[in-house]
Image (spheres, rainbow, N blue to C red):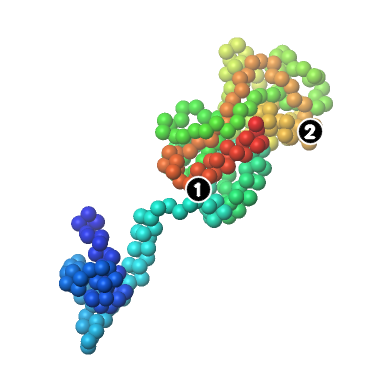
Amino acid sequence: MKLSSVDLNLLVALEALLREGSVTKAGLSMGLSTPAMSHALARLRTQLDDPLLVRAGRGMVLTPRAVALRPRLQALLSEVGAVLSPARTFEPARLERTFRIHATDHVLTVLGTALDRLVRREAPAVTLQFLPNSPDDGALLREGSIDLAVGVYVDLPPELRTRKLFTDRFVCVVRRDHPTVGRTLTLEQFLALEHLQVAPRGRPGGYVDTVLAVRNQRRRVARAVPYFLAGLQLVEGADYVLTISERVAKAVAPRLKLKLLPPPLPLEPYTLTLLWHPREDADPAHRWLRDAFVRAARAAAP
C-alpha cells in the first residue's frame, strides 16, 4: 500500500475510537460530530477489513484486531508527534551517544586530554570511539560509517565540510646521546642517517621524500610505523632520525630523552583539519562535538 493513498488523519480517528470505545465519545474528544465520527469509522472498517467496534448490549466493544492495534497505534502516533514537534533545547548533559572518529595518535597526543576534559564535564554519557585514519576517510564519512575525521587531507569529495583545528611544523628528532649528531643537523648528516618514518595511512613515501626528490636527493627509510608515539620510542633506542610533528615531539621528548633539531631542508607547516559530512550540519549533538574539538584545539594548540 502506498502511503500517498492513505488519509493519515484516519490514524488519529482510529486512536480516539479505540481509546474511547464509543463513536460519540471519540467524536467529542476530537471536536467532531457523531455523524462525522461514524463516517470515519466506516472508512476505517473498509480500509482494515474489520468492524473494529461491535455492539454489545447498550455499548460497544473492541474486536480482537482492534485490541491488537491499540498499543502499536499509540506508539506510532507518539513517534509521529515527536517527529513533527519543534526540537527541544539541546542539553549535552542529557546526551547518550557514541561517536566514531578517525584520528591519529598525533591528534590524540595534542588534543586528547583537553577534549576528554571538555566531554567529561559537559556530556558525561557520551562515548568517543577513536579509530586510525584510513585512505578512505572521505568515503566513510559520505556513507555514514564514521562521524568525524581529523587529519591532513587533499583530494576530498567536494561536498565534505572542513574546519581548521591547529597548525604544526616539522622537527627532526634523534636520541639525546646520538653518536654523530650534535646541536645541529646538516643536510649531509641527514641524508647519511637511517630514517624512521611515520605513515599513519600505510602509504610509502611522504612529504619529506617529495621535497628531497625535487632536489634530486633521497633518504633511506629503514623503518616505517603507523603511529607517532611508536616512532618516537624507536628513536630512543637506536641511531635513527625521525622527521615528525613538533607538538608531539615536544610532548614526549623529555620523558624519552630525545633531542629536537631544525630540519636541514625547507619544510612547510601543515594544518590539521576536522572533517564531516554536511548531513550532520544541523544535528545539535554533532555540532556540539565539533565545537568541543575546536575549543580543545584553542586550549591545547594555540
Q: In the figure, is residue 144 to the left or right of 25?
A: right
How many residues crowd around disc 1 within 10 Å: few (fewer than 14), some, or many (20 or more)? many
Q: Residue at x 46, y 27 (%)?
A: 155
Label 2 – label 1 distance at C-alpha = 38 Å
Q: Nearer the viewer, residue 79 or 240?
A: 79
Indicate whether 289 appears above or below 31: above
Percent x, y for residue 70? Answer: 32, 72
Assess whether mark 1 and mark 2 are in contact (beta carbons under 8 angstroms). no
Q: Quadrant of the C terminus?
A: top right
Indicate whether 248 appears above or below 123: above
Badge 2 or badge 1: first in the primary sequence: 2
Q: In the figure, is residue 190 to the left or right of 295?
A: right
Percent x, y for residue 288? Answer: 53, 45
Indicate whether 252 appears above or below 170: below
In the rendered structure, which amino acid carries the disc numbered 2? Pro
How many residues crowd around disc 2 within 10 Å: few (fewer than 14), some, or many (20 or more)? few
Residue at the top extreme of this rendering: 215
Percent x, y for residue 248? Answer: 68, 32
Q: What residue would you read off at disc 1?
A: 285
Can residue 222 be seen? Answer: no
Looking at the image, is mark 2 or mark 1 nearer the viewer?
Answer: 1
Any mark on residue 302, and which?
A: none
Q: Quadrant of the N terminus?
A: bottom left
Q: Residue at x 74, y 22 (%)?
A: 261
Residue 249 is drawn in which quadrant? top right
- Is label 1 in a helix, a strand or a loop? helix
Can residue 58 be seen? Answer: yes
Any mark on residue 254, and which?
A: 2
